[in-house]
Amino acid sequence: MKKLIFLAAFLFFAPAADAGLSGLGFGVHGGVIFGYDNPILEQSILTDPQFTGFDLAGTMYDVGGHVNIGTFRIIEFDANLDYAWKKQELAPGIDLTYSDFSVTAAVRKSISLGVIKPYLGVGGGVHVNAFSLDIGGQTVGVVLPDNETKTGYLFKGGVELNIPLFPLTPYGEWRYNVIQTTGKSTKYSSIIFGLTLDLP
């Protein structure tokens, strides 16, 4: 409930976005995910005593594309398509692969400071989580969670560089994602860098 109140307050106090479009852009991005916390997956792996040192929090990689829509009131919207994945060795010859394919949308509030434009945003989307275990013919006492499609929400903050007369806008962004997976939520942070082609 608190999260919904925060989202409603953000949208209410942001300037109205009915003044027309100020820009449209398409781009690509990539980055790293850290602090990946999926309690159900980790508990499943830890049921086998040989994997007592297992830890999900290592770096994952993320690639994707995005669309940005701006308005004259400096309210912006973005839609993102992301694929994050990792293959992790549990023991010699035993590999765990897990991934997160997501489609998300967010509303952002930015402030123009010359060529630098910092922003904050909030949004939500759909995540497809998949897990697989390559055991190489060995026997392990692990039952992975089912692959599932779940909703989630995110908070973000970033900085764009608006270089005059240059059609590409580079940016860096931090995101905090929460996915409403079965049992307990999955959470992670990501650092993303990208380029947006601004259409005239």
Image (tube, rainbow, N blue to C red):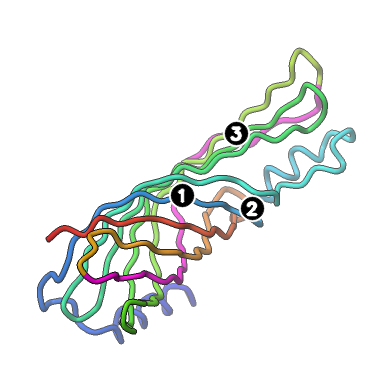
Q: Which residues are magenta?
A: 140-164
Q: Is residue 57 left or right of residue 26?
A: right
Percent position of residue 65, x then y: 35, 48
Q: Dot 1 lies on which element?
A: strand
- Residue at the image position 86 percent from the left and 43 percent from the top: 53
The C terminus sits in image quarter: bottom left
The residue singled out by tag 1 in the image is: 30
Q: Earlier in the sequence, mark 1 or mark 3?
A: 1
Q: Above or below — where is 185 with respect to 142?
A: below
- Residue 118 in which image quadrant: bottom left
Amino acid, disc 3: Phe
Q: Nearer the viewer, mark 1 or mark 3?
A: 1
Q: How far apart are the two marked residues, 1 and 3, measured between alpha carbons?
A: 22 Å
Amino acid, disc 2: Tyr
Q: How far apart are the two marked residues, 2 and 1, measured between alpha carbons?
A: 17 Å
Percent position of residue 138, x then y: 80, 16
Q: Nearer the viewer, mark 2 or mark 1?
A: 1
Q: Nearer the viewer, mark 3 or mark 2?
A: 2
Amino acid, disc 1: Gly
Q: Above or below — where is 10 with respect to 141?
A: below
Q: How far apart are the two marked residues, 3 and 2, measured between alpha carbons?
A: 14 Å
Q: Was residue 136 drawn as part of the magenta stretch in this picture? A: no
Q: Above or below — where is 77 with respect to 128?
A: below
Instruction: Tell me whether circle 1 and circle 3 mark residues in contact (CB < 8 Å).
Output: no
Percent position of residue 142, x then y: 76, 30
Q: Is residue 131 left or right of residue 2?
A: right
Q: Above or below — where is 131 with respect to 22?
A: above
The residue singled out by tag 3 in the image is: 131
Q: Was residue 149 drawn as part of the magenta stretch in this picture? A: yes
Q: Name the mark on residue 36.
A: 2
Q: Earlier in the sequence, mark 2 or mark 1?
A: 1
